[in-house]
Image (cartoon, helix red, strand yellow):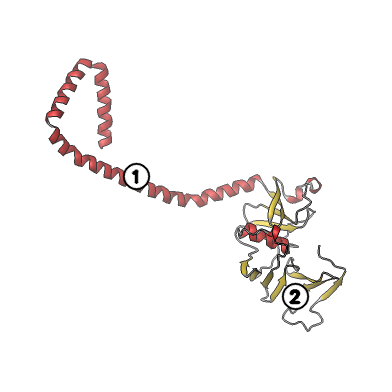
Amino acid sequence: MLITVFLWGFFLNEVCKKYYPNQYNQLSYLLSYIIINNYVNIKAFMEPKIIQLTYNSIYAYSVLQINLIKLQKFVEPYLNKLREIDNKQKYKTTIEFYLNGNLIKEHKFKYNYNQLFISNIEQPQNCDLVLIVEHNNYDNINILLLDRIKEIQFSKSDIKFMSLECYYKNKSYNIQLKTDKYNFYMNDNIINKSFIKYYIKNILKHNINFEHDNDFEYTLNLIDHNVNIVSVNDKDQIIIQKDNYHIKYYIDANVNETMDLNSTTDIASNKSDDFVKLDKNDNLE
């Protein structure tokens, strides 16, 4: 209300000054005389109005700020979802190259992986992990784990571990292979030292410099989908399959052997002849 009165007063003042200059000057002198002679009364009348207007302005600003913050929090998830969908529509496949958990190169494509000419994709010579990321508007992101670029089909695994914990330097790191944002349960994905480095640095956001840690020795404790409990170390590999998984145990650096353990065997017993299978000349890559 006071703002409206002020605006109308300003408008009438400008009109009178322009079109009725003589009358305007006389009126100005008259108003000046009235104000000077009635200063005390005018001050007593206007002062509480101005104070009240100031308080109301501060209150209105505070309410507006609070509501804007609430609106921002309400709208933010939807805006992020729209941004994600927009990014997924722009790119269908992302190929990421890592070394010691650090991203060293990245390619983005508007086509599915099986539509790309693999021979035209340049791969850094010193990378130890390749991520093939398949973007999907209606599902979480499916990720293939490779050691090099090659022809391969995206095929989801049907298994899901109950627990996977990494123990390194007296600290525990929870490894989740599937969330509402990504899915590593893909056929032929290998959980090895390169993947653990990537996961700790990029998913869990722990700033560990693996480049100067040549002795990255850890233990993985696994409770699988059949409630079997398995423990592997940094030299072993967990290989995801369609409806199962198997573990490639590293025996000895001086012995040219590895040991494959299929999860369907009786993990709780080491006495059975069916428990392990020794494959000669099966070196880890």
Q: Residue furthest front?
A: 212
**Which x, y percent locates residue 104?**
71, 50
Residue at disc 2, secondary structure:
loop
Residue under numbered circle 1: 61
Whichever of callouts 2 and 1 sits on the residue coming sooner in the sequence is 1
Q: Residue furthest left?
A: 37
Q: Amino acid at mark 1?
A: Tyr
Q: Point out the frontmost of discs 2 and 1.
A: 1
**Which x, y percent locates residue 278?**
84, 74
Residue at disc 1, secondary structure:
helix
Looking at the image, residue 212 sits to the left or right of residue 13; the answer is: right
Residue under numbered circle 2: 264
Alpha carbons under labels 2 and 1: distance apart: 66 Å
In this rendered view, identify the residue nearer to me: 251 or 76: 251
Seen in the picture, residue 252 relative to 39 is either above or below; the reply is below
**Quarter in which the C terminus is drawn:** bottom right
Seen in the picture, residue 280 relative to 109 is either above or below; the reply is below
